[in-house]
Amino acid sequence: MPDPAESAAPASAADALGRLAAALGASGPGRSPPPVERWNPPFCGDIDMRIDREGTWFYGGTPIGRPALVKLFASVLRRDPDRYVLVTPVERVGIAVADAPFLAVEMAVEGAGGDRRLAFRTNVDDLVAIGPDHPLRFELEDEGGLKPYILVRGCLWARLTRALTYDLVELGEERSIDGVPVFGIAAGGDFYPVPAGTGHAA
C-alpha cells in the first residue's frame, strides 16, 4: 500500500510518473477499464504531462515512448468540470490536453444509409461504434475546415485524423430536415448534420 506521506507529496515531484504507474500496476492489458468515475481521491496538483493535438503524450517535454504506458495512463484519464485528470485510488493529478485526448486512426464501415454501422479504433486501441452512447459531433476550424469527433467514454472524445475526415465526408448524404436540405452522416440509426460553410471537407 502506498505510503500516505508519499501520496500527499506535490504532484510535480520527479517520481510522479513512476508513482502513478505503480499505483496502477493492477490495471494492466486485458483487464476492464478502471472505475475512474467512482474514484474520488484528493487532487494533488498538476504534473508536467500533456497530450498534443495529434494525440501524442508528453512527460517533462519528452514524448512517452512506451505504448503500454500511454495506454495505462489513458485508461485512467477523466474529464472533470475544470480539467483533465489522471485518477488512481490514492490521488488525482491534472494534465494538459491541447484538443481531444484521443485520435481516431482507423474506421470500419458496414451497410449503407440508415443501416450503416461505423466503428473506429483510437490511437490507444479503444474500439468505438457510433451510436447513442458514442455520438459524432463536428466543430469548425478557424479557417473553415471540419473537425469530427466521436465520444469514447465519459466526457472523453477522439478527433478523427484528417484522412479519416475525408473518408467520413465521402459517406455523407443530403436529407430534408424541416423542409431544409441538410448534409450529414447517417450511422448507428441516427443522422449527424455537418455544419454549413465547410464545403464538407477538412
Image (cartoon, grey):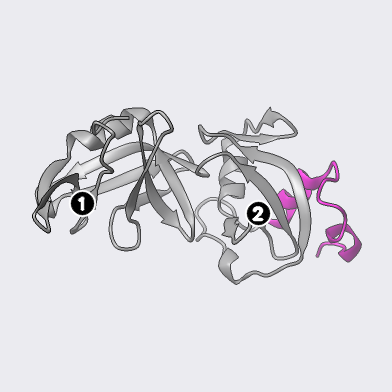
Residue 93, compared with residue 4, is above or below; it is: above
Q: Position of residue 85 (x, y in %)?
A: 65, 54
Q: CA distance from mark 1 to mark 2?
A: 32 Å
Question: Image quadrant of residue 25?
Answer: bottom right
Residue at image position (40%, 53%) is 151
Quadrant assignment for the N terminus = bottom right
The amino acid beneath tag 2 is: Leu
Residue at image position (65%, 39%) is 50
Left or right: 181 as drawn, with respect to 54: left
In this view of the protein, can residue 94 be seen by the observer? yes
| Range drawn in magenta | 1-24
Crowd rating for badge 1 (residues with CA inside 10 Å; few <14, some 14–19, many 20+): many
Which circle's residue, 1 or 2, is located before the other in the chain? 2
Residue 86 badge: 2
Instruction: Assign a secondary structure to mark 1.
Output: strand
Residue 187 badge: 1
The amino acid beneath tag 1 is: Ala
